[in-house]
Amino acid sequence: MPNDVLQLYFNEWNALIISDQKKYDVRVSFRKPVVHFDLSFVKKQNKLYKGDMPIREFVRMENLLNEDIITKYMRLAALPNLSKYALLFIVESFDNTIKKGSVWVVVLKNDTKELVLCEKFIESPSGFNIKSYWARIFYNIFFNISKTAYVRWEHLVKDEVVIL
């Protein structure tokens, strides 16, 4: 897949959470009355992808990341400081061979860059085109958070969250 096509999908997947808040409702999933969105960091990071990391069609791409790698990465990240906490969804892989997507849900304190939460979700895609097929993973993650995961996390984040 050409790099410019990937950039288009990167941007469209990121924008889904903002443009279709009825389907991908962060506020409901995280039980927050106010959520600020700032995709500047994400857009900047996605532009850095120059196609130098091969897109593999038949190689399992799971377990590329772990909490240590994410912690090191987040310490170096220049995140907008709009609130006490930031929430990021870090896509590890969209693996068409096994029909699974792996996404890390990360919550960190903006001032210290300390990870408050770092959990991997593996979900199944579905849909009619590339955009909706892989976007279904995010829908499933939000559903999972809303129904089960948030209860485990409830004590971790009490303040307003910013989506990056």
Image (cartoon, grey):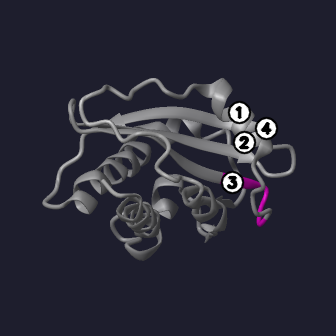
User: What amino acid is at disc 1?
Assistant: Thr
Answer with mark 2 or mark 4, whichever residue precedes in sequence: 2
Q: Is residue 76 above or below residue 159?
A: above
Residue 119 coordinates in the image, percent (x, y)? 53, 32
Mark 3, secondary structure of its residue? strand
Q: Tell me the mark number nearer the camera, choosing from 1 and 4.
A: 1
Residues 11 and 122: in front is: 11
Disc 3: which residue: 86
Q: Is residue 152 above or below residue 131?
A: above
Res. 81 image quadrant: bottom right
Disc 2: which residue: 74
Distance between mark 2 and mark 4 Cα atoms = 8 Å
Mark 1, secondary structure of its residue? helix
Disc 1: which residue: 71
Residues 9 and 125: in front is: 9
User: What amino acid is at disc 4?
Assistant: Glu
On the picture, is 69 further left or further right than 112? left
Disc 4: which residue: 114
Res. 95 image quadrant: top left
Distance between mark 3 and mark 1 Cα atoms = 13 Å
Answer with mark 3 or mark 2, whichever residue precedes in sequence: 2
User: What amino acid is at disc 2?
Assistant: Met
Distance between mark 3 and mark 2 Cα atoms = 11 Å
Mark 4, secondary structure of its residue? loop
Answer with mark 4 or mark 3, whichever residue precedes in sequence: 3
Find the magenta span and give its range: 82-86
